[in-house]
Image (cartoon, coloured by chain):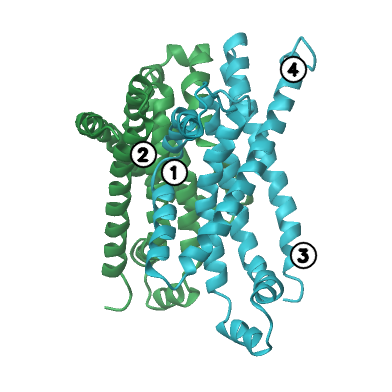
Chain colours: A cyan, B green
């Protein structure tokens, strides 16, 4: 137990901050994912074949390629890509991107592909009559989406989004390869310096279980709230 | 774009794909049996057996695969007693550690898939079997299992693809699988995009094949023939 003490003697406070880091990365990645879903869901539902193709390309490639490979692409290619863009504007110094940003972008793009599929499925399962009724009532496009489609869609999407959240949360463990100090990386460091990997990796597993358990409880509450009236 | 690099790295990556496929097929093979075993335990009426099987699937589905591999590869070697037993022959090899971790992981997901498949079988089918005087054992092997396999095919197809992506984590325990070799080439040439296109292309090709095989099987074993 003294291994988990807070302060200089143990790893308690380090692991606590690492847990916060995991939560922070997961939430950022989830939000980045929503942003991507916002762009690609309309593409997938579009009438135009080329836009469809673009949307399908994104979700197929990201969901068919291992997460680790995507992370390596961002880790090794991220600063190169930024420097290339900067060189167009006449800036030639070395730019290093923060591991947090690289990590949450990489996980965010992966999470976005799953979110896109969830939103697409939810919108498609809304009765066609709802769209038509909204049109007949003369509600504008924004109102149609915001007041009529979105509330119904959220009810259908929340259970599946909770799966996406779980996937995202677990995927953040892979960012440890880029050196960002989250649960996995901190356990690796602690295991290395105390030569007690069994304890620290098991403790990491407990932390992840705790995170998934708590988030499940919170999401269940949300689910109840959005299925009011059903 | 460095096309020469793409061409020269292709055979190396293809060679590493063999490792990925070996890991995948071994863990799916063992995982299917483990999954079936735990699915049957889940359906058991004894609350302790039931809870035990639920705990297994909860723990392995609630923690990242990376943690599981690290516990098995780095953690288990720490137990002095294990080093003296014959198990150590297996556990000192990263290859077997990866397979054990993948098997336990896919076993947990497979048990959930099979459990829900068993539970969706209409009771009428089992009752029909009983009224024909077929023994419980035969009902299970000849009626419930084939229907459950058919029911779980789409979900199991997804699980195969997820597991294929999961094998990329073997590269974190020094195994040179497709992702491991891709990372090695990227870190020596600093050309991430080219390597990503080739390695990602190989992964996508495998996904495509798995997807279509499952689709074919679904059609073949569908109820309407």
Q: Identify residue for label 2.
A: B27
Left or right, B55 with respect to B168, comes to right
Res. A225 mark: 3
The residue shown at (40%, 20%) is B87
Mark pair 3, 4: CA separation: 40 Å
- The x and y percentages for residue A67 are 46, 39
The image quarter containing residue A21 is top right
Res. B106 mark: 1
Left or right, A100 with respect to B19, comes to right
Q: Nearer the viewer, mark 1 or mark 3?
A: 3
Disc 2 and disc 4 in contact, CB within 8 angstroms: no
Label 3 marks which chain's residue?
A
Q: Residue furthest front?
A: A90
The residue shown at (69%, 82%) is A139
The image quarter containing residue A225 is bottom right
- The x and y percentages for residue B88 are 40, 17
Q: Residues within 10 Å of mark 2 (few under 14, many from 20)?
A: many
Disc 1 and disc 2 in contact, CB within 8 angstroms: yes
């Amino acid at each position: 137990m003294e291994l988990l003490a807070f302060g200089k003697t143990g790893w308690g406070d380090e692991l606590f901050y690492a847990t916060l880091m995991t939560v922070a990365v997961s939430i950022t990645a989830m939000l980045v994912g929503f942003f991507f879903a916002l762009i690609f869901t309309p593409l997938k539902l579009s009438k135009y074949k080329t836009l469809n193709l673009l949307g399908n390309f994104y979700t197929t490639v990201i969901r068919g390629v291992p997460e680790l490979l995507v992370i390596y692409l961002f880790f090794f290619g991220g600063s190169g890509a930024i420097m290339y863009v900067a060189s167009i504007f006449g800036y030639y110094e070395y730019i290093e991107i923060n591991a947090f940003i690289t990590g949450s972008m990489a996980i965010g793009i992966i999470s976005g592909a799953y979110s896109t599929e969830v939103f697409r499925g939810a919108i498609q399962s809304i009765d066609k009559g709802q769209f038509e009724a909204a049109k007949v009532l003369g509600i504008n496009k924004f109102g149609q989406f915001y007041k009529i489609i979105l509330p119904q869609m959220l009810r259908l999407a929340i259970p599946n989004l909770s799966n996406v959240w779980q996937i995202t949360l677990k995927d953040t463990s892979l960012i440890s390869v880029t050196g960002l100090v989250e649960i996995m990386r901190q356990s690796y460091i602690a295991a290395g310096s105390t030569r007690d990997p069994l304890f620290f990796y098991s403790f990491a597993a407990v932390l992840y279980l705790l995170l998934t358990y708590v988030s499940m409880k919170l999401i269940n509450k949300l689910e109840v709230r959005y299925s009011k009236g059903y | 774009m460095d096309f020469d690099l793409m061409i020269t790295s292709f055979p190396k990556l293809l060679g590493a794909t063999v490792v990925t496929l070996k890991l995948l097929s071994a863990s799916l093979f063992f995982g299917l049996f483990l999954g079936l075993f735990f699915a049957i335990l889940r359906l058991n009426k004894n609350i302790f057996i039931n809870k035990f099987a639920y705990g297994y699937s909860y723990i392995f589905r609630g923690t990242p695969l990376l943690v599981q591999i690290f516990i098995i590869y780095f953690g288990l070697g720490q137990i002095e007693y294990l080093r003296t037993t014959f198990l150590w022959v297996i556990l000192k090899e990263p290859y077997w550690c990866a397979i054990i971790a993948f098997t336990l992981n896919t076993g947990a997901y497979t048990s959930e898939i099979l459990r829900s498949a068993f539970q969706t079988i209409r009771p009428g089918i089992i009752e029909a079997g009983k009224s024909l005087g077929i023994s419980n054992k035969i009902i299970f092997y000849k009626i419930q299992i084939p229907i459950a396999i058919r029911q779980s095919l789409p979900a199991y197809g997804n699980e195969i693809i997820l597991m294929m992506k999961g094998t990329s984590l073997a590269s974190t325990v020094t195994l040179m699988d497709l992702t491991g070799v891709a990372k090695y080439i990227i870190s020596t040439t600093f050309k991430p995009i080219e390597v990503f296109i080739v390695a990602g292309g190989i992964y996508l090709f495998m996904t495509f094949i798995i997807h279509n095989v499952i689709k074919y099987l679904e059609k073949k074993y569908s109820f309407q023939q």
